[in-house]
Amino acid sequence: MRIDILTLFPEMFNSVFSESIIGRALKNNIFTVNCINIRDFSEDKHKRVDDYPYGGGPGMVLKPEPVFKAIQNVRKENSRIIFLTPKGKVYNQKIAKELSKEEHLVLLCGHYEGIDNRIIENYVTDEISIGDYVLTGGEISAMVLIDSVVRLLPGALGKKESYMEESHYNGLLEYPQYTRPREFNGHKVPDVLLSGNHKEIEKWRIYQSLKYTYLRRPDLLEKKELTKEEEEILSKIKLNFSN
Ligand SMILES: Nc1nonc1C(=O)N[C@@H]1CC[C@H](O)C1
């Protein structure tokens, strides 16, 4: 997978691409990435990339020409041109999985009050929001998208870092995790996890996953096709936790 990032602040991405799992995936050529400064495509002698909004109002708007030139400079036939914006569809693991199968992602990071709408209407394929809040720029949203997509690419996660059972992967919240020591500040690890009884451990994990999802994200349960066993466990949970 190739990822091109169109941004006014390419330096913001340095640590993301040099550290941890994403840094290692890059080093191992699991994906390639290129940060492009939109300002390099401004033909204005002052390298301006923004201007006042037509119709008045506060703030500035990203001009269409430099953004268009930057997009044309990187786009390929089947590129997904993704504009990060609070007005987009809210990002989730399902979208991450879908994007992880693409060959080429172009991430357009907004700034100021936004971007000239003619770019969105005519050249953007996807508008994605990472949540209902307003950031100062789209760069952090782009980092969130890259992290969640790259970790799904074959070979990105090492043997130890399985993602098969993580929250929002199988549609439910993940069960609680514990590691050594067995007792910490008087708090013990649940006995079942020390029992070596994998059937019981699996049952405990399904129960915990359904419990957390029922209590914190019942909306995920509505979308999830539960097995008969999961339905039975959920009925017990509802009895135990019905307030
Ligand atoms: N929430 C979000 N999900 O993706 N991007 C955002 C976001 O707040 N973007 C900023 C809005 C104004 C500035 O243009 C950039």
Image (cartoon, grey):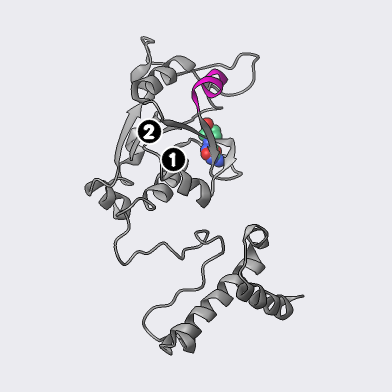
- Dot 2 alpha-carbon crowd within 10 angstroms: few under 14, some 14 to 19, many 20 or more: many
Q: Residue furthest right?
A: 243
Image point (48%, 87%), residue name? 192
Q: Which residues are magenta?
A: 117-124
Q: Nearer the viewer, residue 52 or 219?
A: 219
Asked if labels 1 and 2 touch by Cβ distance under 8 angstroms, the answer is: yes
Please state if 183 lies on the left or on the right of 154 as rendered: right
Q: Nearer the viewer, residue 173 or 197?
A: 197
Return the disc, 2 or 1, that comes first in the chain's sequence: 2
Q: Is mark 2 within 8 Å of ligand 1?
A: no
Image point (46%, 66%), residue name? 165
Q: Tell me the quarter of the image containing the N terminus.
A: top left
When the figure is inspected, residue 22 is found, relative to residue 129, above or below; the finding is below
Percent position of residue 146, x then y: 40, 44
On whether residue 122 falls in the magenta region, the answer is yes
Percent position of residue 168, x then y: 53, 59
Q: Which residue is mark 2?
A: 5
- Dot 1 alpha-carbon crowd within 10 angstroms: few under 14, some 14 to 19, many 20 or more: many
Q: Which mark is residue 189?
A: none
Q: Is mark 1 within 8 Å of ligand 1?
A: no
Image point (44%, 46%), residue name? 144
Dominant SS of magenta comes to helix
Quarter of the figure with residue 231: bottom right
Q: Which residue is mark 1?
A: 142
Quarter of the figure with residue 235: bottom right
When the figure is inspected, residue 140 is found, relative to residue 188, above or below; the finding is above
Percent position of residue 105, x then y: 40, 35
Percent position of residue 152, x then y: 39, 52
Q: Nearer the viewer, residue 91 or 102?
A: 102
Distance from the alpha carbon under mark 2 to that under mark 1? 8 Å
Please state if 53 lies on the left or on the right of 162 as rendered: right
When the figure is inspected, residue 190 is found, relative to residue 100, above or below; the finding is below
